[in-house]
Image (cartoon, grey):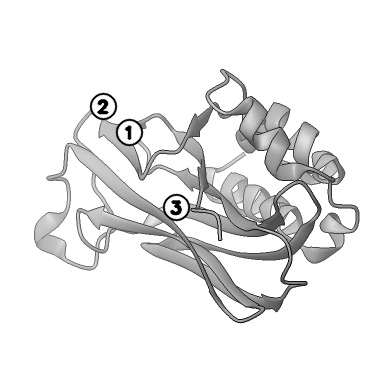
Amino acid sequence: MSKKMLWLIVGLLLAALVSSTALAAPVKNLGKIVDSLWGADITAGELLQLTWPDLLTTMPQSVWNTKVTWGESEMVFQRKEAVTLKNNDESEQGKSLFIYVNCTNAISASGRNVYFGASDTVITPPFLLMPYMSVSAELNEIGGFQVGFTADDGYDVWRVTTNDTTDVEGEASYQTVSYHYAVAPAGYDPPTQFTVRESRTI
C-alpha cells in the first residue's frame, strides 16, 4: 500500500473520530477522569477508552498506539536523516533538524456564554506542511458532563485551529481539555505524537 493511500485511510478514520455523532454519549465526570490519569504512561487508545469509548471503533491504529504526553505546549520531532520537506519557503527545505508544533487551548467567558478552543501551529520551520494534524477541544463542567465540543483537521497543513461558544448554566466551573495529534514527515521521530492539555478553570 502506498504512503499516499495510507494517509488517505488514516484521514478518513480521523474524520470519523472528530464527528459529532461519535460524541452522542459523553462520559460523566470527564474532567475528573482526565485528572486522575494525568501523567500516566498510557496510549491515546487507552485514554479515549475511558473518556470517549464510542470512538474506539473509528480510531486508526496510528492514533490508538501513540503514547500520550501530558500538558506539553509543543510537539517536537527530530530528523533521522537528510530529507526534503514540503515547505512554502523553498530555502528552508531539507535544513531543519527539528520540527516544533505549538499546542494551545483557550477558555473565556462573557456572562453565561463561554468561548473555548484549541490549535496546533508549526512554528519551526515556519509554514512547514505536516502530512496530517488534528485538534479537538471539549468544554467540560467540572464534576459533570461535557457541554461543548469542536474540532479541526487537515492534510499538508501548517496550522489547524478550532473554537466555539456555548451558553452554560452559570453555577458550575468549566475547563477546556484539548487533544492534539500530528503526523511527522517521513524521516522524523517520533512518527506521531498525541498530547493532552487543560486550560485554567473559570
**Gap in angstroms between the C-alphas marked 1 and 3:** 12 Å
* Picture residue at 90% right of the left edge, 58% below the top: 24
Q: Confirm or deny contact between disc 2 and disc 1 (CB under 8 A).
A: yes
Q: Confirm or deny contact between disc 1 and disc 3 (CB under 8 A).
A: no
Question: Residue 2 or 198: which is nearer the viewer?
Answer: 198
- Would you name the residue on which mark 2 appears? 80
| x and y, in percent, of residue 199 in the image | 50, 53
* SS class, disc 3: strand
* Picture residue at 66% right of the left edge, 36% below the top: 34
* SS class, disc 2: loop
| x and y, in percent, of residue 22 in the image | 84, 56
Q: Is residue 110 above or below residue 193?
A: below
* SS class, disc 1: loop
**Gap in angstroms between the C-alphas marked 2 and 1:** 5 Å
| x and y, in percent, of residue 12 in the image | 70, 56
Give the residue at the far right of this rendering: 25
Question: Residue 138 or 200: which is nearer the viewer?
Answer: 200
| Residue 65 visible in the displayed image | no
| x and y, in percent, of residue 59 in the image | 74, 42
Q: Mark 2 vs mark 1: which is more N-terminal? A: 2
| Residue 11 visible in the displayed image | yes
Quarter of the image with the C terminus is bottom right
Crowding at mark 3 (Cα within 10 Å: few <14, some 14-19, many 20+) = some
Task: Look at label 1 and name its amino acid.
Answer: Gly
- Would you name the residue on which mark 3 appears? 131
